[in-house]
Structures are given as structure tokens and as C-alpha cells.
Image (cartoon, grey):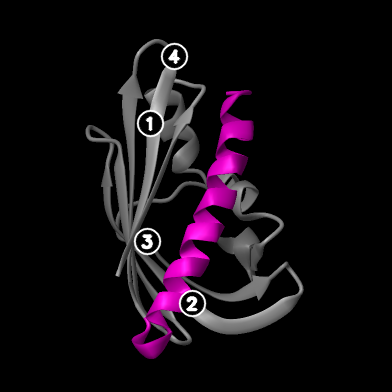
Amino acid sequence: MIARIQTDLPTSAERAWQALIKRDTFLYITRGLLGFAGADEWPEEFRQGDTIETRLLFFHLLPTWRHTLHVVGLDEGKRELTSREFGGPIRQWNHRIAIRPVVGDRCCYTDEIDIEAGLLTPLVWAYAHAFYRYRQRRWRRLASGL
């Protein structure tokens, strides 16, 4: 089941891309809802081929399952990042982020997630929509200062 969420950001596609590949940006946009054990040991910038294994912490307090994130594509020319992720009840969480320029100093930011979690797939899909809307709200706040 695919979840697709998109928003306009008040910054250029280039500035958004440079922010996207940074660990600190990832931690900022997820802060509040989701934390990650050992995130201080992650590389400062994501690179194609990186594999991150972590424990998810809901609301930064409740430890849940181990989660694996593998960066399978990082295309600076197309401004696309793709990852293959899984953990706990989630068999597949394939994520594609695309950043496209819009008129002026704005860009369109899209999260597209292909989700497979067995019988829980519809519930996980609904969570993904809520989670990515939250992330994109944080992105808009961050982007206004880039």
C-alpha cells in the first residue's frame, strides 16, 4: 500500500536537498514523535549504501522494535533519496523523497512510502500519513530559515 504526501517548502530545491541529506535534519523533523537509539553515532550526512540499525523510540521514551534503514539511492541531480526499511511488524517501508523546484525560491517536497505489514498494513499506512504530515510541518518550519 502506497502513501504519498507532499508539500511546498519556502526555500530553493538546492537548499532543501543540502538539508535533506544531513542527519541533524532527519532528527529535527522526526523530533517529538520518534527518536532513534544511537543516532549520535550515525554519519553526519547520509550516503548511498549506508545502513543504519537502530531501536525506535516512540515519543523519545517508549522503546519499540529494531529498525533497519538502508539508503539505496541518493541522486543529487534528480534530488531524490530512496531507502529500503523494515523492522518489527513492518516487512517493507520503501521510502522515496523527491524535491522539485517551483517558481521563485520555493520547492515541492514529496514523501512516497510503499508499505507492507501484513494484516497491519492499513493501520501502518494511516500512521504513515499522520507521521509524514507531522514531518512535513517540521520541514516547513525548518525551510523558512534555510
Above or below residue 86? Residue 15 is: above
Q: Which mark is residue 5?
A: none
Question: Mark 1 or 2, which is nearer the eye?
Answer: 1
- The residue nearer to you, when weighing 42 against 91, is 91
Which quarter of the rendering shows the C terminus?
top right
- Read off the residue under disc 3: 50
Instruction: Find out whether residue 132 is within the magenta segment.
Output: yes
How far, Cα to Cα, is label 3 from label 1?
Answer: 25 Å
In depth, the one of 62 and 121 nearer the eye is 121
Circle 2 or circle 3, nearest the eye = 2
Give the prevailing secondary structure in the magenta stretch.
helix
Q: Separation of disc 2 and disc 4 at Cα?
A: 36 Å
- Sequence order check, earlier mark of 3 and 1: 3
* Residue sitting farthest toward the top: 104
User: For the residue marked with disc 1, what is the amino acid?
Assistant: Cys
Percent of width and height locating residue 84: 32, 67
Q: Quadrant of the N terminus?
A: bottom left
- State the residue at coordinates (56%, 29%): 143
The segment highlighted magenta reads 117-146
User: Where residue 116 sits: x, y (%)?
Assistant: 32, 78
Residue at (64, 47) in percent of width and height: 28
Q: Name the secondary structure under disc 2.
A: strand
Upstream in sequence: badge 2 or badge 4: 2
Sequence order check: which comes first, mark 4 or mark 3? 3
Residue kind at label 2, given as amino acid type: His
Q: Is residue 43 left or right of residue 41?
A: left
